[in-house]
């Protein structure tokens, strides 16, 4: 199967570390991820809260340029928007016609879209990942956090179990880590309210951090730029608002997998994390 | 809101408009409140999701469109996923936000529409969102200069806030796309007003003209569903 990579806007900015670590992991497992040429923003929450037609048209414009390849996505929000547009366009001829009118060309809604977790676990497969592990994450207790948009709604994303997804758990277990059982895998962190009303983010992210800590996790692994930013960057604000001190490193799952695959800290942009992760990694004998 | 929901009048036009815009079926709701149990923001909202659906069923247009809750929804889709009646509550909320924005009831209570507008302007102009530029524009618009101001130096230091962003070509084509989407949305609004017997907002066109747009839309949609438009996928 051939893939083209849709990085999305965040991976060019606040989530550059997700971008770098994704490409580092892909190189180690022999996954070719050329960037989709001239991709445009998926529209994210702003588009679907404003105009449903625009929310389908923006992804359609990018997806129709994939030339038969599967579109690989790392950002959970882009993934959700691209899959939702496909679902609407392929499932309703009237929507397809309206989108064609707005975009200026017809798109059938059938370009396959997969998240990096699906590609690594299902297409490449865990046995191949296991064979590539150089530095197992032994003793590292990870709370795998999926957030809202990978698994919901399941009719659209068809990603994994909507209430208890396990793809990331299996992947990091293959990398030698010990995923913890916890109930907040798909609770909402507050997403883009980080900019418009951060009090919502502080409250929701506090619940997630608190549950991860209660479950005995050393750190959290994420698959979404907004989730990572909220859980990592907001820990200090949460400390002053709620008096709870966590100091839990919040990685992208690609950074942890990259470490296990033998990538260096620089290749994975570990220095971009706000809660310093090196002490934990060194204590577990991983950070060399 | 706690206690009983006060119903002033019973109509059904709002539920129909929501269905038309989003495909969601609020009339299917039987008030089990499973949506509210799982909603991350229900406990602090002026309404809970099941209450909002009930208000839509009962055609409480003003109360619904001025509700704080529709703007505090994080679009996490827990409600939609868990609803035993398959009511797409998150989709319904998208439609309500668009309607609230058009009715201009939102600006006073929330910064979300301003953020969405700035975000989409960036997409139209550059094809991509440049986060630092987005945040500066948002702060200028909302005059929230000091909120989170300490975050910027730290993010710059961590390489999380590049000083320039990428842009994609095809700006004229993109602006035309946004223009066609806006025209389409405006035509939809005029048709909805016509169905409701109101004068279309922001337009001199009367009832007859709006009905004409609705008929034209039905014709276009009907024709298109049998015959896909020309200029196939690239």
Image (tube, coloured by chain):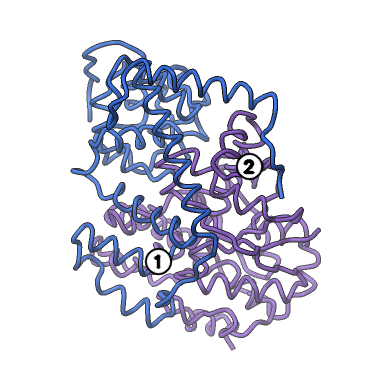
| Local SS, label 2 | helix
x 37%, y 79%: residue: B156
| Residue A171 place in picture, x, y as percent | 67, 62
Which shade of the palette goes to chain A? Answer: purple
x 31%, y 75%: residue: B152
Q: Is residue A14 left or right of residue B151?
A: right
**Which of the chains bears the disc numbered 2?**
A
| Residue designated by label 2 | A86
x 20%, y 66%: residue: B145
x 30%, y 48%: residue: B112
Which residue is more in the foreground, B214 or A5?
B214
| Local SS, label 1 | helix
The furthest residue to the bottom: A288
Disc count in the image?
A: 2
Q: In the displayed structure, would residue A118 be above or below residue B32?
A: below
| Residue B105 place in picture, x, y as percent | 23, 36
Quadrant in which the N terminus of chain A appears? bottom right
| Residue A61 place in picture, x, y as percent | 60, 50
Which residue is more in the foreground, B212 or B21?
B212
Quadrant in which the C terminus of chain A appears? bottom right
Residue A77 visible in the picture = no
| Residue designated by label 1 | B131
Q: Disc number at residue A218?
A: none
Which residue is more in the foreground, B117 or A193?
B117
C-alpha distance separating marks 2 and 1: 26 Å
**Which of the chains bears the disc numbered 1?**
B
Determine if marks 2 and 1 fall on one subunit.
no
Which shade of the palette goes to chain B? Answer: blue
Categorize mark 2 by other alpha carbons within 10 Å: few (<14), some (14-19), many (20+): many
């Amino acid at each position: 199967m051939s893939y083209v990579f849709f990085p999305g806007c965040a991976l060019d900015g606040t989530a550059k570390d997700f971008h770098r670590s994704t490409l580092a992991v892909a190189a180690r497992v022999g996954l070719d991820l050329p960037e989709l040429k001239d991709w445009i923003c998926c529209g994210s929450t702003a588009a679907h809260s404003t105009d449903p037609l625009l929310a389908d048209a923006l992804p359609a414009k990018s997806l129709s340029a994939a030339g038969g390849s599967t579109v690989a996505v790392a950002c959970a929000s882009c993934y959700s928007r691209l899959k939702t547009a496909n679902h609407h366009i392929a499932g309703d001829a009237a929507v397809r016609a309206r989108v064609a009118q707005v975009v200026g060309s017809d798109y059938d809604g059938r370009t396959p879209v997969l998240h990096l977790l699906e590609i690594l676990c299902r297409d490449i497969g865990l046995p191949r990942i296991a064979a590539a592990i150089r530095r197992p994450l032994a003793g590292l207790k990870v709370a795998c956090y999926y957030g809202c948009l990978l698994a919901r709604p399941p009719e659209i994303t068809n990603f994994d179990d909507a209430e208890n997804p396990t793809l990331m758990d299996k992947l990091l277990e293959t990398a030698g880590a010990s995923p913890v059982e916890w109930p907040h895998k798909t609770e909402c962190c507050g997403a883009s309210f980080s900019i418009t009303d951060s009090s919502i983010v502080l409250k929701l992210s506090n619940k997630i951090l608190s549950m991860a800590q209660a479950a005995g996790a050393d750190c959290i692994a994420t698959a979404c730029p907004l989730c990572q930013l909220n859980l990592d960057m907001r820990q200090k604000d949460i400390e002053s608002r709620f008096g709870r001190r966590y100091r839990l490193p919040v990685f992208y799952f690609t950074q942890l997998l990259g470490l296990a695959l033998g990538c260096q800290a620089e290749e994975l942009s570990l220095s971009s994390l706000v809660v310093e992760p090196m002490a934990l990694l060194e204590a577990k004998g991983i950070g060399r | 809101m706690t206690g009983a929901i006060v119903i002033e009048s019973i109509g059904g036009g709002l539920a129909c408009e929501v269905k038309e815009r989003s495909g969601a079926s609020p009339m299917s709701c039987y008030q089990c409140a499973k949506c509210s149990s799982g909603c991350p923001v229900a406990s602090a909202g002026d309404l809970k999701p099941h209450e909002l659906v009930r208000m839509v069923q009962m055609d409480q247009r003003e109360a619904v469109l001025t509700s704080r809750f529709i703007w505090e929804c994080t679009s996490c889709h827990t409600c939609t996923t868990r609803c035993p009646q398959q009511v797409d509550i998150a989709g319904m909320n998208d439609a309500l936000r668009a309607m609230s924005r058009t009715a201009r009831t939102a600006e006073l209570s929330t910064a979300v529409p301003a953020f969405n507008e700035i975000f989409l302007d960036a997409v139209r102009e550059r094809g991509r969102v440049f986060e630092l530029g987005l945040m500066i524009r948002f702060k200028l618009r909302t005059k929230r200069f000091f909120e989170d101001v300490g975050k910027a130096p730290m993010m710059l230091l961590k390489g999380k806030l590049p000083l320039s962003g990428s842009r994609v070509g095809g700006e004229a084509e993109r602006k035309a796309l946004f223009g066609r989407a806006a025209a389409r949305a405006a035509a939809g609004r005029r048709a909805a007003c016509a169905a409701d017997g109101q004068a279309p907002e922001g337009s001199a066109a009367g009832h007859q003209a709006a009905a004409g747009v609705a008929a034209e839309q039905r014709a276009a949609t009907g024709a298109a569903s049998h015959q896909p438009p020309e200029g196939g996928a690239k």
